[in-house]
């Protein structure tokens, strides 16, 4: 009983803490003012970074809310299932359905309030950890720290109570339908696990995941990636909801040679489908979310890298500052060079104003260096770049750091790419030289036939840093993968920890109700170590099942990524983050194994006869 | 026996578990009246349908056909809300496993049905009810601090506090040794003699011999009945069924 309440309370507390922390960080980032004394260009860059951080924190908040809702409701459903007999007993002595339901909802309010009371201070600790992580990953400025807002108290208590109530709602409905007769069945409820709610939720979310997988390829590089990354959530919910169908089946696959222990574990898996499903649920979400998102992210990153490699036509890449184009073109042995100067800009489309990255290019050279068509870009006009987001037709209002260019027609566009890049391409002459003096410049240089690479390199080295195109692409690929990894760690790290705690929670809750079962097995002739081993085999089987089902959810994201990369770049790209997968599996097995050993060890400490004698 | 004399009337009730080849007719077309103010025992071999019959008679289990009347109230037509109300006011239960709530004291367990019905039972009423089962001094104890026989007497007190029309008991002495069982049977005898209707399932001829009448079941059917028989005769009849 204590374990049930403590378990529910823990799930609410951590959920509130995580949501509060993510929300406070988001608000802090969104209201961040640029430090005094920045120039116009630096201010634009600062606000670009803030926009990126806010977007990332928005995703983090979304995941936190999703996890909190999922873990709280699955924990509540589990504790209520464990208390079926109590509710049946109450019904037997005259409790009405409404009374059972009200009792649970009242409990939910108390747990929600209590969870928020502990969750608010805990949230401050989580916030410090999350902010430190984001600082370390370089997504926020060095001094960034979440700020306390008084109104968050109301939000956190509201979140705690609302999530508990929502989580308890379905469970309370089920509890109210418990038949009084169930109190009399000695061996606990053989209640149906695959309820209508589970079927409906499972099928709806499965449909949602399939829809995302189907639609992703037509979403373009940006939308398709977003859809693919969102597949794991509905897919994991569907897998968790339908898991009672599948987990016990996997139990049958346990090696039959494992004798009495294997037989006991197999029987338990079948008989305790509810418990197995409850342990598997957070695991499915953990594996599905972490592996699915990471694998999809890695696939898109690799697709972008491959795309860039196929499209870039250059021998050398020069990185310099300012309008170095003429100087590079003048170096003997240079056949052509696309020099691209990067400037921040703000674009208004309709009522919306957003900051974009713009490149000042030589259209002909750019088209050659990047295998695209870019005709007609000259004068007072712009082209939509490979970064997308800007309409390919019509006109946009364009402002540079301290220069309003007014309405400018969009006269051309290059296809949006997965690797992204500039949103706008500007012709030479549109941007005054004073704005270009300090602009970062990148030149893609093609050598004249017969020119000596060494000589040209030496000459170019006086202008900027020179790398062969191969080296530059490799360095770019490494940088992209690193950024992708950092994003994954920032977005998933703390959520994954929460899901892992949810797994431990379910095992502890499940073990609390198993003292009698263990005692019966020991009276039936099993030694304590055999009981412990059976519990370990059972928990490992459930873990493997959870990993496999989570893997299925992750596979959904990978399929969406494969289809999208194929549609956008023409090459199907699938990257399996094997190290991460191995680590997730190992941690999951280790944590569930250890927890189940500890809990069953402590549940078998009293002499079995004491437990069997107490027939309350 | 007229309708008004029956505490519970079963008219042609059947209860089938499973379907097709696996179907078990746990109760097979039973018509039976349990007399008001009397203690009736239901006996039969294991699996003969005794518990199922009791559950059907108490409105805990639906019947597949036939009708169950509690006094004049038709349980087969009753909705959950009405059945709940009946459990609070007119039906009491005692079972082999005592089914007390472990986290509550004896007094709290006894007061529970009235509290669920929205009443605040006086401390005096709870004390008197516990005293009636001989446990006045154990009010503050939790179930795990009581012996099996004491727990069962708390369960009886809990069933009796609502002054039910009928007390249903399934093997109330099944988990008790003979001396604890004797205390419980004495208690039931006193209640029955005071006019309480009791329907009790038992496989113990000694327990059944304390009842006013005994009904014998086999394969879900009533096959014999006897009134005022002693334990030896009951044991003989039971043996002839097996
Ligand atoms: N929930 C159920 N599902 C399927 N079959 C059931 C169920 N409950 C009882 N039965 C079957 O119905 C028959 C009668 O069961 P019941 O429990 O009424 O017997 P009983 O006379 O009380 O036996 P005992 O003396 O062993 O308690 C048995 O064959 C039993 O297997
Ligand atoms: Mg029985």
Image (cartoon, helix red, strand yellow):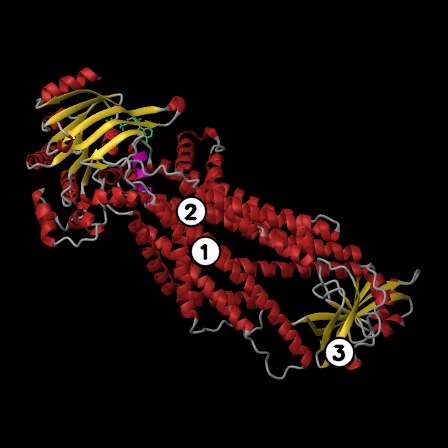
The image quarter in which residue B176 lies: top left
Q: Quick one: B43 or A610, which is closer to the camera?
A: B43
Q: Element at badge 1?
A: helix
- Res A594 label: 2
Chain hosting mark 1: A
In the structure shown, which secondary structural element does the residue marked by tag 2 occupy?
helix
Residue B29 image position (x, y, % from top left): 27, 24
> Position of A148 compared to B204: left or right?
right
Question: Foreground residue, A120 or B208?
Answer: B208
Residue B160 part of the magenta-drawn span: no
Pick the front one: A125 or B98: B98
From the top left corner, tell me how far across and down residue A317 is, in percent. Answer: 80, 65
Q: Which residue is mark 1?
A: A69
In the image, taking residue A506 as reference, residue A49 lies left or right, namely: right
> Gap in Å between the C-alphas at discs 3 and 1?
48 Å
On screen, A132 above or below B141?
below
Helix, strand or loop: magenta stretch = helix
Going from the N terminus, do you reach mark 3 or mark 1 first? 1
């Amino acid at each position: 009983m204590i374990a049930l309440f403590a378990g529910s309370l823990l799930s609410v507390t951590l959920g509130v803490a995580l949501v509060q922390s993510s929300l406070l960080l988001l608000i802090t980032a969104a209201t961040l003012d640029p430090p005094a004394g920045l120039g116009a260009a630096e201010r634009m860059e600062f606000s670009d970074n803030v926009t990126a951080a806010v977007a990332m924190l928005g995703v983090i908040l979304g995941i936190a809310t999703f996890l909190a809702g999922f873990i709280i409701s699955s924990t509540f459903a589990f504790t209520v299932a464990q208390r079926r007999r109590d509710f049946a007993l109450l019904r037997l002595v005259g409790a009405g359905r409404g009374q059972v339901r009200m009792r649970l909802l009242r409990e939910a309010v108390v747990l929600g309030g209590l969870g928020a009371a502990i969750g608010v201070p805990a949230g401050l600790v989580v916030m410090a950890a999350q902010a430190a992580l984001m600082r370390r990953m370089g997504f926020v400025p060095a001094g960034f720290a979440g700020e306390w807002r008084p109104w968050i108290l109301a939000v956190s208590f509201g979140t705690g109570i609302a999530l508990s109530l929502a989580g308890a709602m379905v469970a309370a409905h089920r509890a109210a339908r418990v038949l009084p007769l169930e109190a009399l069945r000695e061996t606990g409820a053989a209640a149906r696990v695959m309820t209508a709610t589970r079927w409906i939720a499972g099928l709806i979310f499965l449909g949602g995941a399939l829809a995302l997988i189907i639609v992703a390829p037509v979403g373009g590089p940006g939308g398709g990636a977003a859809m693919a990354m969102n597949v794991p959530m509905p897919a994991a919910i569907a897998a968790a909801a339908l898991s009672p169908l599948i987990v016990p089946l996997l139990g049958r696959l346990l090696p039959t040679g494992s004798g009495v222990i294997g037989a006991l574990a197999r029987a338990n898996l079948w008989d305790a489908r509810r418990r197995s499903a409850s342990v598997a649920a957070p695991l499915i979400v953990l594996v599905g979310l972490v592996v699915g998102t990471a694998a999809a992210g890695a696939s898109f990153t690799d697709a972008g890298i491959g795309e860039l490699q196929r499209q870039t036509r250059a021998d050398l890449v020069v990185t310099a500052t300012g309008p170095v184009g003429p100087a590079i073109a003048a170096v003997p042995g240079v056949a052509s060079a696309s020099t691209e100067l990067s400037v921040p800009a703000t674009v208004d489309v309709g009522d919306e104003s957003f900051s974009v990255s713009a490149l000042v290019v030589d259209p002909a050279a750019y088209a050659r260096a990047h295998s695209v068509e870019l005709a007609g870009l000259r004068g007072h006009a712009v082209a939509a770049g490979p970064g997308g987001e800007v309409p390919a037709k019509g006109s946009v209002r364009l402002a540079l750091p301290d220069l309003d260019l007014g309405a400018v027609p969009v006269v051309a566009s290059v296809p949006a790419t997965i690797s992204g890049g500039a949103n706008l391409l500007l012709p030479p002459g549109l941007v005054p030289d004073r704005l270009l003096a300090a602009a970062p410049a990148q030149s893609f240089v093609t050598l004249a036939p017969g020119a000596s690479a060494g000589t040209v390199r030496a000459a170019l080295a006086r202008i900027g840093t020179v790398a062969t195109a191969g080296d530059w692409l490799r360095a770019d690929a490494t940088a992209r993968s690193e950024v992708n990894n950092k994003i994954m760690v920032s977005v998933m790290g703390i959520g994954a920890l929460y899901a892992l705690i949810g797994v431990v929670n379910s095992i502890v809750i499940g073990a609390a109700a198993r003292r009698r079962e263990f005692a019966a097995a020991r009276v039936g002739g099993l030694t304590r170590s055999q009981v412990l081993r059976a519990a370990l085999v059972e928990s490992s089987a459930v873990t493997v099942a959870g990993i496999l089902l989570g893997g299925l959810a992750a596979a959904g994201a990978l399929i969406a990524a494969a289809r999208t990369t194929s549609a956008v770049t023409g090459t199907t790209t699938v990257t399996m983050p094997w190290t991460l997968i191995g680590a997730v599996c190992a941690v999951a097995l280790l944590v569930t194994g250890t927890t189940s050993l500890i809990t069953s060890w402590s549940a078998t400490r009293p002499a079995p006869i004491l437990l069997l004698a107490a027939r309350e | 026996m007229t309708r008004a004399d029956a505490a519970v009337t079963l008219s042609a009730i059947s209860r089938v578990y499973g379907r097709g080849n696996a179907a078990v007719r746990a109760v097979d077309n039973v018509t039976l009246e349990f007399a008001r103010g009397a203690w009736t025992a239901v006996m039969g071999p294991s699996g003969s349908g005794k518990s199922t019959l009791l559950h059907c008679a108490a409105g805990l289990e639906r019947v597949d056909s036939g009708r169950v009347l509690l006094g004049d109230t038709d349980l087969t037509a009753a909705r959950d809300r009405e059945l709940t109300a009946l459990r609070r006011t007119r039906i009491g239960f005692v079972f082999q496993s005592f089914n007390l709530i472990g986290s509550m004291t004896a007094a709290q367990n006894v007061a529970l049905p009235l509290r669920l019905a929205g009443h605040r039972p006086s401390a005096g009423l709870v004390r008197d009810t516990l005293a009636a089962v001989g446990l006045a001094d154990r009010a503050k104890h939790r179930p795990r601090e009581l012996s099996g026989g004491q727990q069962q007497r708390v369960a009886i007190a809990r069933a009796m506090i609502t002054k039910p029309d009928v007390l249903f008991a399934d093997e109330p002495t099944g988990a008790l040794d003979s001396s604890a069982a004797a205390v419980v049977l004495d208690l039931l005898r006193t209640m029955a003699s005071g006019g309480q209707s009791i329907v009790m399932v038992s496989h113990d001829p000694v327990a059944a011999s304390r009842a006013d009448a005994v009904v014998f079941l086999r394969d879900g059917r009533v096959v014999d009945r006897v009134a005022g028989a002693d334990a030896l005769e009951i044991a003989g009849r039971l043996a002839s069924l097996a």
